[in-house]
Image (spheres, coloured by chain):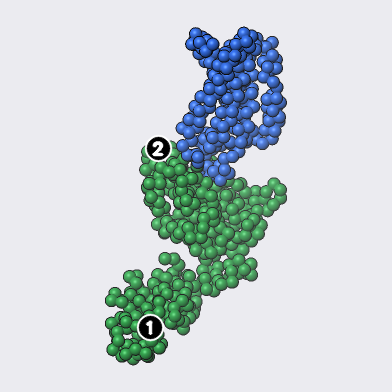
Chain colours: A blue, B green
Amino acid sequence: MWSWIPSNGSLIWQLTWENAKLGVLPALYGLVISLPLGVIAARWRWFYPPVLTVVNILYAIPSLALFIALIPAFGLTDTTVSIALTVFSLCVILPNVVAGLRGVPAAVTQAATAMGYGAFRRLIAVELPLAVPVILAGLRVGVVASISLASVGQLIGVSSLGYLFIDGLQRSFPTEIYVGLVLVIALALVCDLILVAVRRALTPWAVS
Amino acid sequence: MITFEAVTKRYPDGTLAVDALDLTVPDGKTMVLVGPSGCGKTTSLRMINRLVEPTQGAIFLDGTDVKDRNPSQLRRGIGYVIQQSGLFPHRTVEDNIATVPVLNGWPRRKARARARELLTLVGLDQDLARRYPHQLSGGQQQRVGVARALAADPPVLLMDEPFSAVDPVVRASLQDQLLALQAELRKTIVLVTHDIEEAIKVGDLVALFRPHGKLAQVAPPEQLLAAPADDYVAGFVGFDRGIRRLSFLSTDALVLDASPVLPADATVAKALATSQPWICVTDADRRPSGWAAREVLAAAAGDTPLGQLRAEPIGHPFTVGTDSLRAALDAAVLSPAGQAIGVDGDGRVLGLATFDQLRAAIQAADAPAGDRMEARRP
């Protein structure tokens, strides 16, 4: 029964690649949206509580329900899954962006201002770099969750490693299910390790 | 020159932080703002580089109202040092120091070269240039903070409790270094502290604040100690101001007696002939090696060299002309003979001063108040 693996090598590889794209890209979109929102929320405190409430409600929606809600607008497509996963990623990354920016020591921001940094330059040169460890911690969670949720997209016909679960179930063929499971976990692990390496490269100054 | 003209700061909650402050900081001088917490000293400092805007009044920097300057441009021309150093954790020491030159558009290479010059200036090793702030001790971080403030060679330096977060030994060495730097650079410095000792040590002028932003007295430190304006100032300055004031009096005019000073190869008979209660014994280089008591002399044979007798330790001598009368008095108090040993710059004995001679010198220094000696610092 393990001979199923080599004979379906190209299918497995294709599904893995699709699952990776479908998981990682929305997490990156989530990051891109979280950054400006987080900056605004960190600067104007009144902005954050309502945003956080909305974000938490969105995060509570079951992924399948969100896919279904988006189908009328976007059909049974990658776009539907990507939008849903972007929303979920945003939900875990945004709080980290806010926490990261708020965690910059007051003495440091004050010193930056007193050295002659304008607000925008200070944000780019001082605050965001110092928030990187916390932001990347959020991105790691977002990427791992998103890779795992991407497989659910198979339920609305969007190709991913989820195919192996559904096909394996329908054919009562556990090997296929195990392979899918191991690959989803391995994929998440690899992406997570890449992000750890990225963090190390970006923050040689961090106390570790 | 920095001038405060009737500057008032009232916070939105109604707290009066600074109340109609008039103050002038002359060029090249260190003005220390000192007072209890909540007296408005830090607020006053922060209004100079517009981190805080006054409610009323104006602050002039070299004749220009600071509110007419672009805040970022203004701040790049004013060095700023704060308590926890405020170094950027994500930048190496050299890049921290190079901050303002880089903001001013210097090429990075040139800015880093400048940073290394400054490391040397503040007494740090070049090897530290590539380290990150968390790899340095608190004292080293504070020195880097000073180097960063000086990087663009600003004429004005603002220091907000710069040394309060380090232990007393490190603090003293940072203060000494500030004095040495200031002797060389002659910046216009405004330094905030709650520590009156620090104010007296580093200030050319001390502005003592009352609670809620009223000035109690502005004076050179020796005058603050000698003539406090009122009970508040006297109380803040502390009860032993009489002794502390001696730090500002020179030992130049002190009358020294060289007759009880004898070399180690002189004989007991010669020592007894001086009829002094204590003999200060010196080595071949005329440096003090110990005190010989009269009882010890009397018990020894007349031809014994003094160097072979049991001697009492000398405590510490004072350097004539360099050390203050406070150091001389301390030397006398700690000496078993009750006399201070005055030495020259090379440590050779010039003579001894008794309590009577010290008192005479103090009175003489007080009499012509106008031309009092400046024997402030090492």
Which residue, given by chain and number where applicable, does mark 1 sit on?
B292
- Is residue A81 visible in the rendered structure shown here? no
Q: Give the vertical position of A26 relative to B52 (above or below).
A: above
- Chain bearing tag 2 is B
What percent of the width, then of the height, locates residue B202? 49, 61
Q: Residue furthest front?
A: A1
Q: Residue at x 58, y 36 (%)?
A: A100
Residue B352 badge: none
Dot 1 crowding, Cα within 10 Å, few <14, some 14–19, many 20+: many
What percent of the width, then of the height, locates residue A56? 69, 28
- Chain bearing tag 1 is B
Residue B108 badge: 2
- In primary-sequence order, the first of circles 1 and 2 is 2
The one nearer the camera, A83 or A208, is A208
The one nearer the camera, B283 or B296, is B296
What percent of the width, then of the height, locates residue B191? 53, 56
Q: Quadrant of the C terminus of chain B?
A: bottom left
Q: Residue at x 58, y 59 (%)?
A: B194
